[in-house]
Amino acid sequence: MSGELSFFELGVANTEQGRKFYSALFGWEFESGPGGSGYSINTPNVPGGIHGGDEGAGPYVFFRVPDLDAAVEQVLALGGTVDAVELGEDPESVAKFGRFKLCHDDQGSAFGLHEPPSGN
């Protein structure tokens, strides 16, 4: 369903330290991410990820869309913006996790869009 919470991403300075912290706190299970950078997080409800080099970042929240390109066009048409940050568009990552874009609404509030992989 379009607009439902689809994915979250945690930015931390050190991924291994972050993995240990959140595993101990919530009991989450982690799997290595594509190319060995970061981890995917298995939670009881919404899947997530964790990446390093982002000290002090707040969580990134992604909303599900059926067509990322169309949703990006709509964000822009409504006066929002789309960040130019590359979020894993390589075929392996897209096949496993889908496609992502970081955006801001027309007032500057941050959010993300997520088009899940085919068949999900």
Image: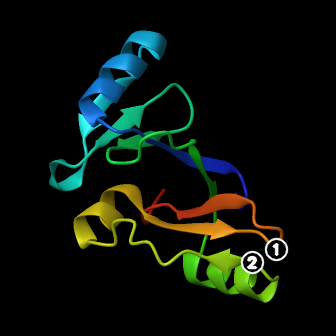
Residue lying at 39% horizontally and 66% vertically, measured from the top left: 87
In the picture of the structure, the residue carrying the numbered disc 2 is 80
Question: Which residue type does callout 2 highlight?
Answer: Gly
Q: Residues within 10 Å of mark 2 (few under 14, many from 20)?
A: some
- Contact (Cβ within 8 Å) of mark 2 with mark 1: yes
Residue 48: x, y in percent? 46, 41
Q: Residues within 10 Å of mark 1 (few under 14, many from 20)?
A: some
Q: Decide: is 114 above or below 74.
A: above
Quadrant in the rendering for residue 31: top left
Residue lying at 51% horizontally and 44% vertically, measured from the top left: 57
Residue lying at 48% horizontally and 56% vertically, measured from the top left: 120
Q: Decide: is 63 above or below 74.
A: above
Residue 60: x, y in percent? 56, 49
Residue lying at 42% horizontally and 21% vertically, measured from the top left: 22
Q: Element under label 2?
A: loop
Most extreme residue toward the front is 56
Question: Which residue type does callout 1 highlight?
Answer: Asp
Q: Element under label 1?
A: loop
Numbered badge on residue 106: 1
